[in-house]
Amino acid sequence: MPLAIAFALPAAGCVEREVVVQRPAPAAVVVAPKPPPPPPQAVEYIPPPPAGPPNGWIWQPGHWRWDGHEYAWHPGQYAERPARFERWVPPHWDERGGQWFFVEGHWA
């Protein structure tokens, strides 16, 4: 018993701290109901960024979205970077097994 106490006393002074880092969930993949292939990426004029916030502005390129009947172009825009080292992963279309999937844009 004295040996158990001898080991327990030094451990009693130890403090363990748990750090939890929360990251946003990865972008969801939305299955479009069998749309045809998306049109080619449109050419966009990228204006100069507005006066900047501390983390800067990031250009989010435009993209095609399927509305259930046809593709609609959503033009690009500037967005404030949420953190200094975050990067924007643009939305895009992937073909898998003959079906098209839209992958939402997200910060990484």
Image (spheres, rainbow, N blue to C red):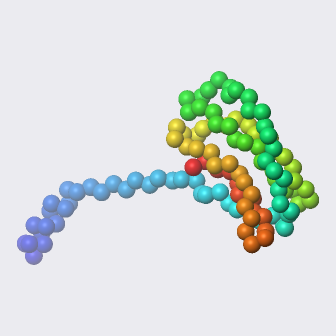
Residue 25 sits in quarter:
bottom right
- Indicate the position of residue 74 as horizontal and vertical percent values: 81, 45
Residue 30 visible, this orientation:
no
Question: Which residue, as the protein is rendered here, is positioned at the far right?
Answer: 69
Q: Would residue 8 appear left or right of 24 to someone viewing this image?
A: left
Residue 85: x percent and y percent? Answer: 52, 41
> In this view of the protein, can residue 97 be seen by the observer?
yes
Image spot of residue 20 (x, y percent): 44, 55
For the residue pair 7 and 80, the one nearer the viewer reads as: 80
Residue at 81% in and 44% down = 42
Asked if residue 23 is positioned above or below residue 35 in the image, the reply reads: above
Q: Is residue 28 above or below residue 43?
A: below
Q: Which quadrant holds the N terminus?
A: bottom left
Percent position of residue 8, x then y = 16, 66
Q: Which residue is pictured at 77% across the width and 33% down the height? A: 45
Is 46 on the left-hand or right-hand side of 53?
right
Q: Which residue is painted at 68% across and 60% down in the image?
A: 28
Give the camera-side residue of 36 and 30: 36
Q: Residue at x 75, y 72 (%)?
A: 97
Q: How many marks?
A: 0
> What residue occupies the far bottom of the structure in this picture?
1
